[in-house]
Image (cartoon, rainbow, N blue to C red):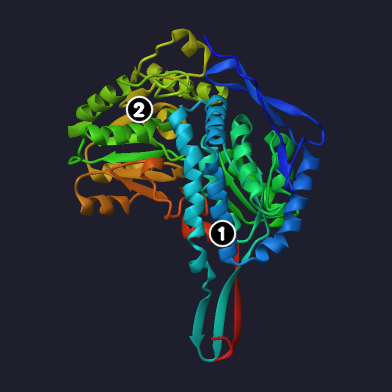
């Protein structure tokens, strides 16, 4: 029996004010664990709302860009404090996020609290950003300054919307830009409430958030003449579409797209309980709906069965169900369309003769059949041509494939159109770095994988079809700026 919960309603936040969409339209959001449960209503923006938000951001830009880096950093620290100040409000956002998204509550807590750390981390860049680069030598002296681009359109996906926003929003702000944010429609409410709280701490128009379908507001926002930078996180297919939209205005783009991360488990890898738990989280955190999840495991043939047995032991202990229940360790897939993709890949592998193990406990079978659930699934030694190997599954299933030599494993890892992340599992530090350098990916973890192993100081992004440009780190700030060189006669400037 479930408790009746009053549906939440969220509005747009533009120019320092909460407001409904011009049309007055709203859309409904339902709980993926209980698809008949209405979670709430979100404002459904249209092109007029896009115009109003972009105008507000454009008007706010000159004054915001004129502040010093330290002044903007002070605002970032105020945002970080404000997000954590009201524990009851934080708990309410966590509950809403769990219900609208489906992820387990402790993952929602992680996401809602981690973003404050991201703001504080970026604020600490103020001194470094304040230092112009200088070039000295006859006949010129040169100062290289950096200028904010202007209005930045930030588009975040449904899987980790708040965390991913934390990889681009504080960077855009400290760089001197104003922003218009579009969250993904299927997990927009908790993100909108969080962003609105941030915006309350800033001058009107610096942060604006609009919600609605991509078909109604995505294209108008990304092709808007007032937008001077685009930062998009999402699928490869949509990323290509974003580039086409940006081309008309020659708008600079940063794209963090899909991944099909390979993990290479070498012959000497430590496969104790701690390592297996880290590997399990690398695959199945947030039900596998993570761009940087471990999506292909290549293991030395001599350790193959040991690894399989170890992951079976970990996965078998998992409890699949409603993320609001404290005993649940894996929630549902966020939406029916993505569940169908994952199940389709699993069924294809079964039909091709691969051994498929669907593991974990299901305390409530009726709920499992009603919601968008899939147990943690291991696909053993599948044909490498299958979709479960070639494509990004973005759900709780992973292929495990034995290899005989490191060269073979590296070749297989690189045989992909993706190149977001990878991992190397070994007890030999020298070998770990040697192998990592051969992998075509933007980020390689050693003896770990995914968000829990990520250093926020490092740039994040992908090779090949996994994206263009970088988020996070100091490079993530520079992505929102234009270099401006000022040269003069020797001894004029330095």
Q: How many marks?
A: 2
Residue 243 drawn above or below residue 97: below
Tell me what residue is drawn at x 29 percent, y 25 percent. Answer: 314
Image location (x, y in percent) of residue 55: 78, 52
Answer few, some or many: residues within 10 Å of disc 1's Cα (few below 14, many 20 plus, some between 14 and 19): some
Q: Secondary structure at mark 2?
A: loop
Alpha-carbon span between mark 2 and mark 1: 54 Å
Q: Is residue 179 left or right of residue 3?
A: right
Mark before the other along the chain sequence, 2 or 1: 1
Residues 411 and 96: in front is 96
Q: Secondary structure at mark 1?
A: helix
Image location (x, y in percent) of residue 348: 43, 20
Find disc 1 in the rendering and name its residue: 74
Q: Are marks 2 and 1 in contact (CB under 8 Å)?
A: no
Residue 14 drawn above or below residue 101: below
Image location (x, y in percent) of residue 297: 32, 35
Image location (x, y in percent) of residue 394: 47, 31
Of marks 2 and 1, the one in the foreground: 1
Q: Which mark is residue 465?
A: none
Answer few, some or many: residues within 10 Å of disc 2's Cα (few below 14, many 20 plus, some between 14 and 19): some
Tell me what residue is drawn at x 43 percent, y 31 percent. Answer: 106
Q: Is residue 412 left or right of residue 101?
A: left
- Which quadrant of the structure image shows residue 304? top left
Q: Is residue 387 left or right of residue 335?
A: left
- Which quadrant of the structure image shows residue 386? top left
Look at the image and tell me whether residue 450 can be seen. no
Find disc 2 in the rendering and name its residue: 383
Residues 464 and 277: in front is 277
Look at the image and tell me whether residue 469 can be seen. yes
Residues 184 and 61: in front is 61
- Which quadrant of the structure image shows residue 215? top right
């Amino acid at each position: 029996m479930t408790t009746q919960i009053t549906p939440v309603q969220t509005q747009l936040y533009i120019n320092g004010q909460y407001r409904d969409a011009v049309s007055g339209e709203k859309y409904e959001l339902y709980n993926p664990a209980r698809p008949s449960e209405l979670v709430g209503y979100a404002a459904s923006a249209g092109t007029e709302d896009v115009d109003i938000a972009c105008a507000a951001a454009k008007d706010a830009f000159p004054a915001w860009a004129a502040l010093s880096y330290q002044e903007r950093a002070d605002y970032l620290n105020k945002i970080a404090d404000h997000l954590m100040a009201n524990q009851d409000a934080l708990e309410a956002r966590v509950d809403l996020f769990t219900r609208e998204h489906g992820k387990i509550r402790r993952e929602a807590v992680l996401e809602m609290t981690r973003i404050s750390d991201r703001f504080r981390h970026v604020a600490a860049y103020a001194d470094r950003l304040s230092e112009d680069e200088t070039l000295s030598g006859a006949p010129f002296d040169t100062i290289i300054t950096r200028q904010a681009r202007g209005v930045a359109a930030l588009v975040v996906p449904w899987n980790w919307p708040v965390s991913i926003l934390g990889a681009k929003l504080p960077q855009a702000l400290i760089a001197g830009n104003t922003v218009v944010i579009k969250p993904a429609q299927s997990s927009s409410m908790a993100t909108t409430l969080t962003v609105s709280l941030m915006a309350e701490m800033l001058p009107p128009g610096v942060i604006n958030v609009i919600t609605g379908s991509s078909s109604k507001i995505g294209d108008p926002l990304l092709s808007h003449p007032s937008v001077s930078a685009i930062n998009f996180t999402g699928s490869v297919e949509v990323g290509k579409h974003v580039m086409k939209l940006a081309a008309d205005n020659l708008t600079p783009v940063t794209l963090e797209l899909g991944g099909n991360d390979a993990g290479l488990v070498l012959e000497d890898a430590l496969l104790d309980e701690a390592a297996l738990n880290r590997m399990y989280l690398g695959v199945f955190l947030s039900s596998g709906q993570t761009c940087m999840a471990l999506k292909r495991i290549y293991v030395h043939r001599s350790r193959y069965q040991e690894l399989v047995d170890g992951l079976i032991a970990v996965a078998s202990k998992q409890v699949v169900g409603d993320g609001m229940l404290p005993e649940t360790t894996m929630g549902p897939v966020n939406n029916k369309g993505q569940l169908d993709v994952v199940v389709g890949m699993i069924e294809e592998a079964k039909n091709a003769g691969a051994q498929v193990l669907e593991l974990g406990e299901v305390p409530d079978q009726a709920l499992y059949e009603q919601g968008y659930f899939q147990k943690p699934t291991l696909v053993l030694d599948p044909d490498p041509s299958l979709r479960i190997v070639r494509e990004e599954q973005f759900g709780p299933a992973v292929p495990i494939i034995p290899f005989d030599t490191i060269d073979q494993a590296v070749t297989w890892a690189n045989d992909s159109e993706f190149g977001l992340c990878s991992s190397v599992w070994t007890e030999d530090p020298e070998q770990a770095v040697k192998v990592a350098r051969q992998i075509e990916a933007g980020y390689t973890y050693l003896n770990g994988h995914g968000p829990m192993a990520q250093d926020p100081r490092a740039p994040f992004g992908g090779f090949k079809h996994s994206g263009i440009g970088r988020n996070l780190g100091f490079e993530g700030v520079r992505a929102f700026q234009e270099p401006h060189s000022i040269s003069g006669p020797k001894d004029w400037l330095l």
